[in-house]
Amino acid sequence: MAELDMKHPVKVDENKTPTVDYAVGDVLSDIYIDPEKERAALRKFDIYVFPVSVIFIVLASLDRNNLGNARVFGLEEDLGLHDRQFGTINTLSSVCTILFELPWVLAVRHFGARAALGTAFISWSACTIGTAFITNYGQAIAVRMLLNTAEAGLAQGFAFLFSTIYPRELIGKRVMSTNLAQCISGAFGGLFAYGVQTMGTRNGLAAWRWLFIVEFCFTIFVGGIGWLFLPKAPETAWFLTAEEKETMCLRKQRDILHRGPDKFDRKWIKPALTDPFVWMIGLAFFTSSVAINGFGVFLPTIIQGLGFASLKVNYMTIPVYVLGAASLITQCYISDRFKRRGAVICGCCVPVAIGYLMAVGSANPNVGYAGMFVLVLGLYPISTLAVAWVTSNLAPDDKRSIGMPLAYSFANISNVVSSQLYPSGQGPRYIQGNAVSAGLTAVAGFLYGATWWFLWRRNAQKQKLLAEGATTNGKEGDQSLDSMYIL
């Protein structure tokens, strides 16, 4: 393996024309790294960091999903909520997610994952226990807005961290930690909520309050242990040997065109904000996320609205999430294996639309419940692969740290829509919410297709210039001739 002197970084022959690997989309560098040693270093991150990302997001998602379970337990009645007020709580909370997502990712970029994500962990834990003691509508809004502020950059912070660790074409299996965690928390949350519900009122506290108390205790213990495993930066991770740290430093030098320098450069702010790719995938992400956001918060409400008893609702959500997790893992492995994002995403839009239409088209609760199984086949892979798509195609790190959360913020804006789609007054079938989700998912399929065509055209233009002997197109980062977009 090549030696790396940190005072005299590895130099690449500037007179040699760069070679582009069109399958992966990277420049083939002169820096050689033993593949076995590279895989050994990356396996360490799979062992120590990937599980922590799942744990953190499971704990955060558990709280969001259990708000829906708490609604079934009687939260609305105890707080005196009516009609759209429950949805309004989610709407206002989503505003905080939209506003604070970018600052959190920039914090990960500047302070490191351990400091930034650890601060988020402590903050949202405090808000979780606070939810157990709210007594009115105003307190509910305040606590949930603070909680969403703390959780705003969690998923994207880990996605950004993964983009600094793993090769671009393999990031899908790691970014899936976000939605895999949502599936786990959905399944566990249903089982956990079912157990808490059977407790009934204890010590003057309703079951839905105990839901958040027990959740806080579990979060602070398990999450606290996970926090200790987070590194500040991939090249200095405490669990790596000296040789593995050297390997990660070499990777950073090899991928310098994709990563960029350590110090943040303000010149990338404008390219990130004006790149059409960011806005196109952001708009597509918005339309597809209405379905997933509504599903995550309101699945118990949907099933209850289909005519099933309250106690039965909680364990009926479990098999839906289990199937969703299995489909998510399968689709992400397929996408990484064939290095295709757009085609897989478009294909996943089909079952989501069909599933919601099944719930709209039939008053039979069994058909509606079956529709949940159909739509979950494509629900989680869409958002996972959309994040992987934008994360792996924006370069360098500075542009990615702005463009990625910007695109993802469109998905969170969809919370404003989805949280208003299932007001209690429109039960039991919530035809409007399910119909809107189906229609927007169909629109999303066309928008993701348009995004694929846009990147394909950019690649074609680059290939034409390279074929003509050009060595530069006057652009930097992902738009230069030094790399190709993953489609």
Image (tube, helix red, strand yellow):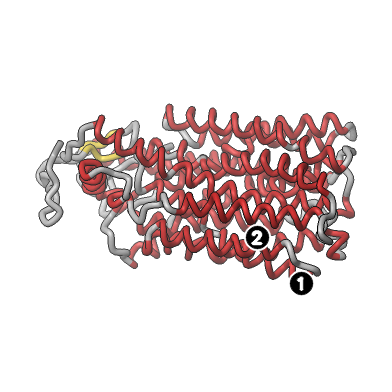
Instruction: Specify the amino acid type for callout 2.
Output: Thr
Tell me which residue sits at (54%, 31%) in the image: 329
Q: Residues within 10 Å of mark 1 (few under 14, many from 20)?
A: few
Quarter of the rendering occupied by the N terminus = top left
Dot 1 falls on a residue whose secondary structure is: helix
Earlier-in-chain disc, 2 versus 1 = 2
Look at 55% across and 36% down and name the residue there. Answer: 345
The quarter of the picture where the C terminus appears is top left
Of 462 and 269, nearer the camera is 269
Provide residue 12's location: percent of width, then percent of height.
13, 45
**Could one spot residue 347 in this view of the protein?**
no
Secondary element under disc 2, as helix, strand or loop, is helix
* Residue 332 drawn above or below residue 218: above
Give the labeled residue for mark 2: 128
Q: Residue furthest front?
A: 203
Give the residue number, with chain letter if any, for mark 1.
138
In the shown orientation, is residue 59 left or right of residue 359? left
Amino acid type of the residue that numbered disc 1 sits on in the rendered structure:
Gly
Q: Residue at x 59, y 50 (%)?
A: 59
